[in-house]
Amino acid sequence: MRRGGRLKRGAWPAAVAMVLALTAGCSDGSRPSWLGLESEQPNAGQAGGAKPAKATTPHEVLGALVTAMSSQRSVEHRMEWSVSGNVAKESFTSQRQSSWVDAATQNYYIDYMRQGPGTVAGRSGCKDGRTLVYLEQQNAWFQSAKACDPPGAIAGGLFSGGHVGDGILPPAMTADEATKFVSILNNVPGLLTPSVEQVAAQGKNYLRLSLDLQPAGDTHDVTGWLVAARKEVDPNYMMKPMLVENYETGDNYSPVRAVYWLDPATYLPAYVEVVTTVTRRDGTPTGAVRLRRTEFLFGGPAPGADINTVAPLPTLSWPRMGTQPLAIG
């Protein structure tokens, strides 16, 4: 099978079935000393709920992260995206976005602005199931009768739930889905390498969880495995919001490093940086490096665009934290 690209229809089930067979009984029940610190913010991430059990290993911290996120009623993502280096082959070079999803209803909202090389930034969105278009000359929103594309329009559709999330972890999963999702990824040989450490940032204590994702399997895919795992845990995944890093551009075989800053008491993320070393299908780098920065707000109402008022997209309060791309070779 050739390197890179998406698997053909029907190829994922066999691969994932093999992985699922490996997940049974993979924990030995041992628990070394806890890595976390008591949070200086009991409600960090603007979320409530009981304090979760203490996680220990990097894999357990990852599991605690997705479980914590699954307990939240809603999540808002505030995102900035940029690309550096050789941008000649990049379809766009900057993006800012606000998105929100309700876990119970799977309703979502999107407001984002994109700009390509040598082009003027364009702003679009989705609200109440209908597309939003920003009319620059009138400095006004127009809500068309066109329905937003289905959330599963991951590889296209400017108005789809495929733009909701941080690029790695699907939002609005149930606890069972979250557990199974991580179990699948953990058991794809060579795909995922997590690490965790205690850090101080923004005047608070955090767990910094790094996830290195490398080409794996016969297809040498990377973020395509995120889609496969989501499909395995929920056959109706195409109707659920999920942003998949590099999937829209077809570069899902490029290595990715995602670094999350987690509240050590709740394991909810405050901020994440996702860095892609863009590669060609043969694995050689193009010279472009993509950076997606996302802040999380939990439990709040939909931010929503006021059709009668054009407000600027929210800015991130976190600075760039210097996450480095994965080295090739």
Image (spheres, grey):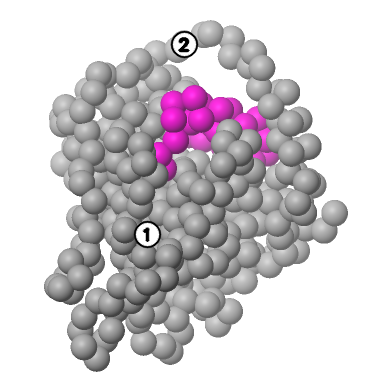
Between the C-alphas of marks 2 and 1, the distance is: 46 Å
Query: Image point 20% across, 84% down: which residue?
Result: 139
Q: Is residue 117 left or right of residue 18?
A: left
Q: Is residue 252 above or below residue 89?
A: above
Q: Which residues are magenta?
A: 171-195
Q: Residues within 10 Å of mark 1 (few under 14, many from 20)?
A: some
* Three-letter code for the amino acid on which mark 2 is drawn: Arg
Report the residue that reaches farthest toward the front. 145
| Helix, strand or loop status at disc 2 | loop
Residue 167 visible in the displayed image: no
Image quadrant in which you'd find residue 319: bottom left
Query: Image point 31% across, 61% down: which residue?
Result: 127
Q: Nearer the viewer, residue 108 or 297?
A: 108
Q: Is residue 34 left or right of residue 187?
A: left
Query: Image point 66% across, 17% down: which residue?
Result: 24
Q: Which mark is residue 129?
A: 1
- Marked residue nearer the N-terminal end (2 or 1): 2
The reply to whether the magenta stretch includes residue 126 is: no
Tell me how many marks there are: 2
Image quadrant in which you'd find residue 228: top right
Q: Which residue is mark 2?
A: 31
Residue 73 visible in the displayed image: yes
| Helix, strand or loop status at disc 1 | loop
* Residue 184 drawn at (x, y percent): 62, 32
Q: Comparing marks 2 and 1, which lies closer to the viewer? A: 1
